[in-house]
Image (spheres, rainbow, N blue to C red):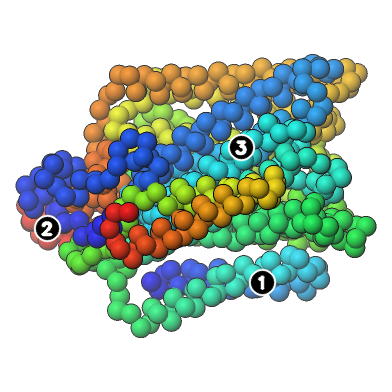
């Protein structure tokens, strides 16, 4: 069925019940927008093209994969706690760290953000009835699910799953060094999930460019949606390169080409160029959405407008642009890359990131802070990402990189960056928007337990890894000698990993409690300012029956607090001639 | 429209400049070609939208003082429930599995993809429940 969507009606502060007498969010059965015609049950799930259903499917799938990959991490940590452990064989260990990295990076951190939360929240934030291409959006999810199952099925075939690390460096990944169907399944899974990401990127960009509500100019779009737009463009730059590289590698493995083999006149380092031209933007595809989440969360829990809105937008753009020019800082030790170029550009990324930190702190400065769960996770993100970022600046220096390349120092660095973003900020966003998505609250006390256990476990796991890396422990080893002196630090790290694992039990209990004993959330439990808080929780089919006048980047706040409207610099400051004449002043703003 | 066009074209120009700098400092062809590809990715749609933005009248979503009522008329047409994305996704999955496990999977993959291609076309043309 094709539905032609009429625009929502205007609702003004002096008519709080709306023009036809019912308040926003209270949509009766007579309301055609609230009525969704279509199949029910599992067929509804399979055939749905609603961005809210697809977003939830994405989130649930990616969280399941997150837990699977987390259990792999615990097995890895148990193996490393004892120098000569034989918990798993070397081959299994290689498969475990490969699949841990692949699941976390390709199948959790990206899809959770751009397929899950963004899919659900971006159309709400810009006032759109759905994503621009709903069936393409559904196809993205099915490709993602197919790719995830394909990748995991590597464990079921003879020879086991892929075991060449998540970066699949040539020539380790060729047919001689990595035979077996598991490696092929891994490559094919990347092809499927890569296209899934490309379609989502197209969808996000088109939605934000062309489906904004009237008055929602580009510079009023919330930062989360801005970041998703930039992420969408980055996806379009990065993922096609990955797909090309995967096809080339597959041809090398099966069709007798010699693109990455020296013997046939190929260049193994070319794989690294192609992979990291995808891989470094990918790092920011994983980071920018989460930056956006905390940028939307800080103002709400500081009860202030965002400090430096345009600065945030331009910082996001600069980070994204620079991230595409720094791929070879992963290849310093190959000896064939231009060190000054990549080192300089890598250092430069610290500048827009610093602007972001400045603005986040500026947003909190002087605000009425309330430390509810989403705010705690966002602050945890600041600390975690700062530590990961600062060590990243160290690694951008070629001499330091030569020292620490392929040691646990690098492992600790990127885990702190990625857990800072995809876990701390990701769960901040999840706790923040969960009431909007399900119409019920998560418990705040359990959320705080989750946060503090995660926060303690995080530092306990990864700070020892920096040290053990500086003492020389290489990545991707399944055992080491007791005389190396790395045992104590590894035991600490393993204990920390189990604290992180335990922290997610609080999360699961929280979900269970909220499912069994729901507390109704209402439309706007946090008194948020973005447009998404204006509609009901969960939103009706096609999202909005009414829209407020959009005169700033937080229209819902302006509507709910007309006495504290967001006043834009550069625009005439409204002079309320008559306090009772609300419509005039809103129009003049 | 104007902001989107400038955003895309600006992306393209940035990568063009960086690509040229990269070429003349390193003479490394893989990275240069990828940067030039990124430049085209921004410039092609960006210049097209820029051209259109001068021909179109300003849209209500770009007008800072637009009233909600200015969005009058249909926002867009959205498809209802459709089984075909699922069929097409499964077809794509079986296609890649064909490359791993052999040609015996190819008929299944081709059947799924063909039926999805026909189904989604018919569905769009009819505009009704399929």
Query: Residue A108: which disc?
Result: none
Q: Nearer the viewer, residue A135 or A15?
A: A135
The image shows residue A12, relative to residue B53, as above or below, that is above
Quarter occupied by the N terminus of chain A: bottom left
Indicate the quadrant where residue A499 lies: top right
Helix, strand or loop at mark 2: helix
**Res. A281 image quadrant:** bottom right
Marks 3 and 2 close (CB-CB < 8 Å): no
Q: Is residue B103 above or below residue A449?
A: below
Point out residue A394 in the picture as x, y percentages from the top left corner: 73, 44
What is the crowding at mark 3: few (fewer than 14 residues within 10 Å), some, or many (at least 20)?
Answer: many
**Residue A167: % across, % down:** 73, 45
Chain of the residue under the numbered disc 3 shown in the image: A
Task: Tell me if residue A41 can be seen.
Answer: yes
Task: Judge depth for marks 1 and 3 and give the one in front.
Answer: 3
Mark 1 = which residue? B36
CA separation in Å, label 3 and label 2: 50 Å
Same chain under badges 1 and 3? The reply is no
Residue A104 bears which disc, if any? 3
Q: Chain of mark 2?
A: A
Dot 1 lies on which element? helix
Q: Residue at x 28, y 33 (%)?
A: A439
Disc 1 to disc 3, how far (Cα)?
30 Å
**Position in image of residue B113 (x %, y %):** 52, 55
Side of A58 where A52 appears, left or right: left
Residue occupying the point 11% across, 45% down = A30
How many marks on residues? 3
Contact between labelled residues 3 and 1, with CB atoms less than 8 Å apart: no
Check the residue under mark 1 and report the chain it is in.
Answer: B
Of residues A461 and A545, the one drawn nearer to the viewer in this rendering? A545
Q: Tell me the residue that label 2 is attached to.
A: A583
């Amino acid at each position: 069925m094709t539905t032609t969507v009429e625009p929502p009606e205007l609702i003004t502060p002096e008519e709080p019940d709306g023009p036809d007498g019912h308040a926003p969010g209270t949509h009766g059965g007579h309301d055609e927008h609230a009525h969704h015609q279509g199949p029910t049950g599992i067929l509804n799930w399979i055939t749905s093209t609603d961005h809210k259903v697809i977003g939830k499917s994405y989130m649930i799938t990616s969280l399941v994969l997150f837990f699977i990959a987390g259990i792999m991490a615990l097995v890895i940590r148990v193996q490393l706690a004892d120098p000569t452990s034989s918990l798993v064989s070397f081959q299994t260990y290689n498969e475990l760290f490969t699949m841990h990295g692949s699941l976390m990076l390709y199948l959790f951190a990206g899809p959770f953000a751009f397929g899950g939360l963004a899919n659900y929240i971006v159309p709400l934030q810009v006032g759109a009835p759905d994503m621009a291409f709903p069936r393409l959006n559904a196809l993205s999810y099915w490709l993602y699910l197919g790719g995830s199952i394909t990748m995991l099925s590597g464990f079921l075939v003879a020879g086991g799953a892929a075991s060449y690390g998540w970066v699949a460096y040539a020539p380790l990944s060729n047919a001689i060094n990595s035979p077996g169907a598991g490696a092929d399944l891994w490559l094919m899974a990347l092809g499927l999930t890569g296209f899934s990401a490309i379609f989502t990127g197209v969808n996000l960009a088109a939605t934000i460019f062309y489906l904004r509500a009237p008055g929602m100019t580009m510079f009023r779009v919330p930062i989360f949606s801005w970041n998703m737009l930039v992420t969408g463009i980055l996806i379009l730059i990065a993922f096609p390169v990955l797909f090309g590289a995967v096809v080339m590698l597959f041809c090398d493995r099966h069709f007798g080409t010699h693109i990455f083999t020296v013997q046939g006149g190929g260049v193994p380092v070319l794989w690294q160029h192609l992979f990291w031209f995808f891989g470094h933007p990918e790092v920011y595809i994983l980071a920018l959405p989460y930056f956006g989440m905390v940028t939307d969360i800080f103002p709400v829990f500081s009860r202030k407008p965002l400090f430096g809105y345009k600065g945030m937008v331009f910082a996001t753009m600069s980070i994204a642009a620079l991230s595409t020019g720094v791929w070879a800082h992963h290849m310093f030790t190959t000896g064939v890359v231009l060190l000054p170029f990549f080192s300089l550009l890598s250092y430069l990324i610290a500048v827009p990131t610093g602007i972001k930190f400045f603005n986040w702190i500026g947003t909190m400065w002087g605000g009425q802070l309330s430390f509810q769960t989403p705010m705690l996770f966002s602050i945890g993100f600041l600390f975690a990402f700062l530590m990961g970022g600062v060590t990243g600046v160290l690694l951008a220096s070629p001499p330091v990189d030569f020292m620490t390349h392929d040691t646990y120092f690098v492992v600790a660095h990127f885990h702190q960056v990625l857990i800072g973003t995809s876990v701390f900020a990701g769960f901040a966003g999840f706790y923040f928007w969960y009431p909007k998505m399900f119409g019920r609250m998560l418990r705040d006390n359990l959320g705080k337990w989750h946060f503090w256990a995660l926060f303690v476990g995080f530092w306990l796991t990864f700070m020892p890894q920096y040290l053990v890396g500086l003492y020389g422990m290489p990545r991707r080893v399944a055992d080491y000698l007791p005389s190396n002196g790395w045992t104590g630090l590894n035991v600490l790290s393993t204990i920390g990993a189990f604290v992180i694992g335990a922290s997610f039990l609080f999360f699961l209990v929280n979900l269970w409690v909220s499912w069994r004993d729901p507390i109704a959330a209402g439309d706007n439990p946090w008194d948020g300012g973005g447009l998404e808080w204006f509609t009901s929780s969960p939103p009706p089919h096609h999202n909005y029956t009414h829209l407020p006048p959009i005169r700033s980047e937080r229209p819902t706040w302006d509507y709910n607090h007309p006495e504290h409207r967001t006043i834009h610099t550069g625009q005439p400051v409204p002079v309320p001639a008559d306090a009772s004449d609300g419509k005039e002043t809103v129009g003049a703003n | 429209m104007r902001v989107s066009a400038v955003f895309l074209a600006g992306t393209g120009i940035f990568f063009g400049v960086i690509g040229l700098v990269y070429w003349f400092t390193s003479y490394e062809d893989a990275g240069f070609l990828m940067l030039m590809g990124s430049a085209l990715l921004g410039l092609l749609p960006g210049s097209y939208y820029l051209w259109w933005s001068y021909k179109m009248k300003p849209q209500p979503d770009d007008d800072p003082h637009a009233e909600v009522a200015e969005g009058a008329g249909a926002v867009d047409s959205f498809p209802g429930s459709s089984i075909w994305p699922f069929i097409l996704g499964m077809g794509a999955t079986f296609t890649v599995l064909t490359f791993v496990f052999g040609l015996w999977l190819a008929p299944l993959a081709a059947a799924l993809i063909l039926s999805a291609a026909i189904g989604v076309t018919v569905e769009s043309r009819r505009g009704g429940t399929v």
